[in-house]
Image (cartoon, grey):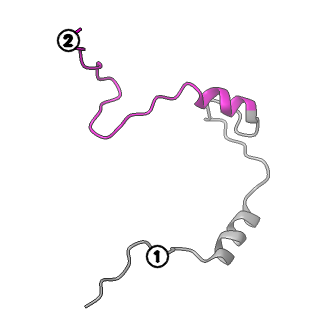
């Protein structure tokens, strides 16, 4: 028995194109910490982001280095 692929596409290319066409050109989000319509503001905000890998806690102190 052949197993079903779990990596099948959820949406067709036509559905993706239709969703993009329905997306607004301008976003007004007063709760956002930056203006999502200003590319420089978005880049500046996300340039300060820290990646948290699986198993890490965002406020966890880094492990102490041992050795020399």
Stretch in magenta = 40-68
**Residue 16 % position (x, y):** 65, 70
Residue plotted at (29% across, 20% down): 62
**Residue 32 vs residue 64, the one in the foreground:** 64
Q: Residues within 10 Å of mark 1 (few under 14, many from 20)?
A: few
**Residue 64 % position (x, y):** 23, 14
Residue plotted at (25% across, 19% down): 63
Name the outermost residue toward the front. Answer: 68
Name the outermost residue toward the right. Answer: 25
Name the outermost residue toward the left. Answer: 67
Distance from the alpha carbon under mark 1 to that under mark 2 = 48 Å
Relative to residue 51, is residue 58 drawn left or right? left
Among the 4 quarters of the image, the one containing residue 7: bottom left
Q: Is residue 67 magenta?
A: yes
Question: What residue is shown with label 2?
Answer: 67
**Residue 35 vs residue 48, the one in the foreground:** 48
Q: Is residue 41 magenta?
A: yes
Question: What residue is shown with label 1?
Answer: 8
Answer yes or no: do the residues labelled 1 and 2 have beta carbons within 8 Å?
no
**Residue 62 vs residue 34, the one in the foreground:** 62
1 or 2: tag closer to the N-terminus = 1
Say which mark, if any, is on residue 49. Answer: none
Residue plotted at (29% across, 33% down): 56
Relative to residue 12, is residue 39 drawn left or right? right
């Amino acid at each position: 028995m052949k197993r079903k692929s779990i990596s099948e596409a959820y949406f067709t290319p036509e559905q993706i194109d239709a969703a993009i066409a329905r997306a607004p050109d301008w976003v007004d989000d007063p709760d956002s910490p930056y203006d999502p319509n200003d590319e420089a503001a978005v880049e500046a905000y996300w340039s300060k982001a820290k990646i948290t890998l699986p198993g890490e806690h965002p406020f966890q102190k880094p492990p102490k280095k041992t050795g020399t």
